[in-house]
Image (cartoon, coloured by chain):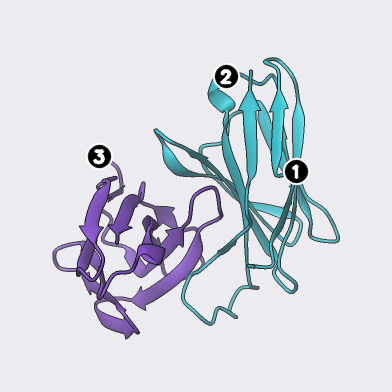
Amino acid sequence: QKEVEQDPGPLSVPEGAIVSLNCTYSNSAFQYFMWYRQYSRKGPELLMYTYSSGNKEDGRFTAQVDKSSKYISLFIRDSQPSDSATYLCAMSRGGGSYIPTFGRGTSLIVHP
Amino acid sequence: DSGVTQTPKHLITATGQRVTLRCSPRSGDLSVYWYQQSLDQGLQFLIQYYNGEERAKGNILERFSAQQFPDLHSELNLSSLELGDSALYFCASSPPDGTFVSGNTIYFGEGSWLTVV
């Protein structure tokens, strides 16, 4: 079993839909949870990060972490065609270990 | 633009050959990470250097090696290349220990696309 599981999709939604992207993990030592967005043939770019459990909102994006269930989510409201990309979750332990473990990424397609 | 620079962007080489990928981290960053991304394996951590010293090793093959130079740029050397080494190779960097301002985030370059034929 991989440490971080993420459905690769693709997930296809109409413009304006609410998108839910999810990851599960097995390592209870993870403290930092991140979402990266990767456009085709580009490097991943940080979208949001959360420390420990809870919610964080940034514009149309909301990140949720449920450590008790080892489950994290990214919600995108009012999705746009420009949101079409691969979304990778990542997580890491606290302390001196800063190497994130990445999920495989979910391909999202928002069609007009 | 993340500030991480990678060269070359694309390269095609034959099996058995050796290539070197180069990375310049963001200004002020001391850590450099190398990742391999393929369709079937996703983003795999290879190795990390911090201020010139190897800090952590992931799933890096013995045919691969890396180093970080005094000016903090890094090189990833891939030798005896096989068809299965075809992938996107990313370099990433992160700030000095204790200075993270956005969690344990790392910043990626645009990648080097390697095709082995």
- Give the number of marks: 3
Q: CA distance from mark 3 to mark 2?
A: 26 Å
Which residue is under mark 3? Answer: A1
Quarter holding the C terminus of chain A is: bottom left
Q: Chain of mark 2?
A: B
Nearest the viewer among A54 and A105 is A105
Which numbered tag is attached to residue B83? 2
Q: Residue at x 60, y 48 (%)?
A: B90
Q: In the rendered image, which quarter is residue A31 located in?
A: bottom left
Which numbered tag is attached to residue B41? none
**Three-letter amino acid code of the residue under disc 1:** Pro
Label 1: few (<14), some (14–19) or many (≥20) C-alpha neighbours in 10 Å: some
Which residue is under mark 1? Answer: B8
Q: Residue at x 76, y 25 (%)?
A: B18
Where disc 3 sits, the SS reads loop
Nearest the viewer among B45 and B117 is B117
Label 2: few (<14), some (14–19) or many (≥20) C-alpha neighbours in 10 Å: few
Q: In the rendered image, which quarter is residue A83 located in?
A: bottom left
Foreground disc of the pair 1, 3: 1
The hue in which chain B appears in the rendered picture of the protein: cyan
Q: Chain of mark 3?
A: A
Label 3: few (<14), some (14–19) or many (≥20) C-alpha neighbours in 10 Å: few
Q: Chain of mark 1?
A: B
**Three-letter amino acid code of the residue under disc 3:** Gln
Label 1 or label 2, whichever comes before in sequence order: 1
Q: Residue at x 50, y 69 (%)?
A: B105
Left or right of B72 in this view: B63: left
Q: Is residue A52 above or below residue A101?
A: below
